[in-house]
Image (cartoon, helix red, strand yellow):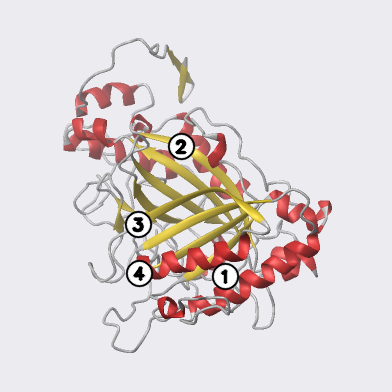
Amino acid sequence: MTRWTTGNTVTTESEPSDSAPRPHGFSRRGLIASAAAAGGTGVVGAVAGFGIGRSRVTDRAEAAPSRDLSGANGPLTEPFYGPHQSGVETPPQAHAHFLALTLKTGIKAAEVVRWLRLLTADAAALTQGSGPLADSEPELAHDPARLTVTFGFGRGLVKLAGQKLVPTWLGPLEKFSIDDLDPERCTGDLLLQICGDDPLTLAHARRMLWKDSRNFAEVAWQREGFRRSYGSQGEGKTQRNLFGQLDGTANPGSGSEDFARIIWGQGTGRTDAVYSARGEPPDNLGAHLPDWMRGGTTLVLRDIAMNLDTWDKADRPAREFATGRTLDRGAPLSGTDEFDVPGFGAVDRRGLTKISAASHVARARDGLGPEAQIHRRTFNYETGAEEGAGLLFASFQADIERQFLPIQRRLAEVDLLNEWTTPIGSTVWAIPPGIEEGEYIGQSLFEG
């Protein structure tokens, strides 16, 4: 049974049985009928976008910084050392490899520290264009192409440093009705998020880091993802997912006060801060984080399968009605520009709400406070096999309970895009803070 609540009315509908015939196509009329049960006012967040910049009253806070696309200034590198790990606030690269590892039986804390020291040294070298000491093909590392390696800690790894150091939120998310999770994609003690603009560089880095790991861990799962190729579009443009939707419109701007509060969990203290149309987020979202995570953040990584075959059967008006945004510009159906603030009460000349209350953008945003924001760093995948296509949805936020879960619970309850998407993998990771040269990732945990 499906229960949708509108005002003081609860509508219950029977779900079709597995044997019941399903429609071969979708139309705006069909979607309107299903949306009517959800309400009459109408939010893109989890598969089509969230906000950044603000030169005017828009959904955007601050534009992402531009970078040299010509390569004329030599190899392009991202910093490895600093107060935060790279690969979070870093402008997303063209390629990503997510490698989840499970500790071998009997591994102790001292061995994990030795492993992390080795991984840290080699990741630092690779990201700066140098081969690690044991690299037999160091030439493959000489063009880092903005390579970053971001470390995520799972519950099992943190527990080795002490049970009392394990945050309560570091574990599986609650079960959502839309989930069809593969248990093998929901585990791991250490996550390596390896990103870069060149797939050869990335493949070499993955190989080197796996060499470092094989004596300590086994592969739990791995997945490759991609975005637009390096230099194929102007800098600062929002990427598209395999549905053709602009994905990440509402992300907080890199370097902004919004980003500092929403992702790193505390404000910068700047007096000239400008906030998006969502309002001023709290400056204490990271207050609940343990001391060893100060300067870090949390990651919820969801593997979302996308049914492109049935998406192809929906006409363009139906697709836009489901998302609440136009496909060409990514503008809310109440506006004309990608960064226009969605008007959930706006109606057309017939008196019909322009953005459905059941649309993705409405469910992900309408009625939620300024604290309910995340930074989505997404990558597409296409296997060409039975698993098909999907989206690696990496959600960074300081507080999972206050930021991610309010959004996800609403999307699981009602979201027209659920017709075409199914979460098949789900993991939660603690992202430790950055380090200074001479330190190792996780030192604040094991020696704090």
Q: Nearer the viewer, residue 102 or 95?
A: 102
Residue at 38 percent across and 81 percent down: it is: 76
Mark 1 sits on what residue?
85
Callout 4–callout 1 Cβ contact below 8 Å? no
Q: Earlier in the sequence, mark 4 or mark 3?
A: 4
Identify whether 25 is placed above or below 308.
Answer: above
C-alpha distance separating marks 4 and 1: 20 Å
Residue type at mark 1: give it.
Gln
Please identify the residue farthest to the bottom as the structure is shown.
73
Callout 4–callout 3 Cβ contact below 8 Å? no
- Nearer the observer, disc 3 or disc 1? 3
Residue 349, horizontal then vertical, whole percent: 16, 36
Q: Earlier in the sequence, mark 3 or mark 1?
A: 1
Residue at 39 percent across and 38 percent down: it is: 305
Residue 422, horizontal then vertical, whole percent: 42, 34
Callout 3–callout 1 Cβ contact below 8 Å? no
Mark 4 sits on what residue?
198
Residue at 39 percent across and 54 percent down: it is: 225
Q: Earlier in the sequence, mark 2 or mark 3?
A: 3
Mark 2 sits on what residue?
423
Q: Earlier in the sequence, mark 2 or mark 1?
A: 1
Please identify the residue farthest to the front as the structure is shown.
136
Tell me which corner region of the image, top left, top right, bottom left or bottom right, holds residue 74. bottom left
- Nearer the observer, disc 4 or disc 2? 4
Q: Residues within 10 Å of mark 2 (few under 14, many from 20)?
A: many
Residue type at mark 4: give it.
Asp
Q: Earlier in the sequence, mark 4 or mark 2?
A: 4
Q: Decide if residue 8 is on the left or right side of residue 39.
A: right
The numbered mark at residue 226 is 3
C-alpha distance separating marks 3 and 1: 21 Å
